[in-house]
Amino acid sequence: MLFDGIPMIYQGQEQHFSGANDPENREALWLSGYDTKAPLYQLATELNRIRKHAAQIDPAYVDSQTFPIYTGSSEMGFRKGVEGRQLVMVLSTQGTDSGKYELDMPIGYEPGFVVMDVLNCANYSVNDMGLLKVSMDKGEPRVLFPADMMEGSGLCGFGRSNGTTYLNLKKNTMQSSGGRLSNRPTLSLLLIGCLTYLMLWCCVLLHPFEVTLKTFVI
């Protein structure tokens, strides 16, 4: 769901349908009870939210190309998004019986940068070598995103977006001291313009010929 293009899953896959032989591979979705607690349903929801959040923060995310950044004995890491706001996913071919281990990945962030695994809400920091030590377990995937950009994602305890992107909020915060001052002259000029317009109309009503003549001469 995090690769390029439109995400696609088979109907019922999120409900753990087995998809056996015909006609069992056309199971009725309504017979599942629409279980929103099913693990694959939860996974699809989380992946869709972070995908939507990444696109809200940076519209260029949608058109950016996914490319591999890491290859291990049983893992592959992929990156999508522009520098500084990239989304990184790590996939493993190890099964649920595999134990815990760590990967050292060149994730593309500066040392000390903190990313969050949106699937288990764990934070990881880039070390001095520019590598990220990622904990792996049971063949589970990892989806990493900048921790300071998670607000508005609706994941890991962060609130849902209200339509304003995080980058816009951050930009407005940086310009707040100058922004407030710059708005005041604009409001003042607007008020002055309104008063001038009213005064002109008053003069027209009181001395229509004189005002018209002066306006024509000017």
Image (tube, helix red, strand yellow):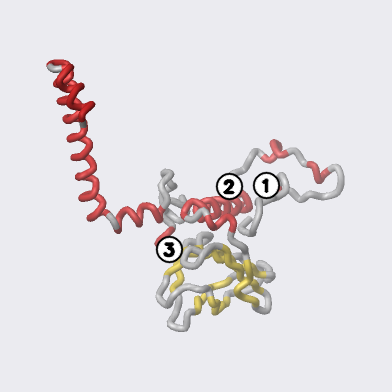
Q: Residue beneath label 3, please?
A: 147
Looking at the image, the residue that sits furthest to the front is: 217
**Residue at mark 2 to residue at mark 3: CA–CA distance:** 26 Å
Label of residue 64 in the image: none
Three-letter amino acid code at disc 1? Answer: Gln
Q: Is residue 117 left or right of residue 202?
A: right
Looking at the rendered structure, the secondary structure element under dot 2 is loop
Looking at the image, the residue that sits furthest to the right is: 22
* Circles 2 and 3: CB atoms closer than 8 Å: no
- Is residue 102 visible in the rendered structure shown here? no
Q: Is residue 148 left or right of residue 25?
A: left
Vertical arrangement, residue 137 with respect to residue 158, above or below: below
Three-letter amino acid code at disc 2? Answer: Lys
First of labels 2, 3 by sequence position = 2
Residue 183: x percent and y percent?
24, 46
- Residue at 17% in and 22% down: 211
Q: Residue beneath label 2, please?
A: 37
Three-letter amino acid code at disc 3? Answer: Ala
* Circles 1 and 2: CB atoms closer than 8 Å: no
Name the residue nearer the viewer: 95 or 47: 47
Q: Residue beneath label 1, please?
A: 15
Residue 5: x percent and y percent?
66, 54
Residue 155: x percent and y percent?
47, 53
Vertical arrangement, residue 129 with respect to residue 115, above or below: below
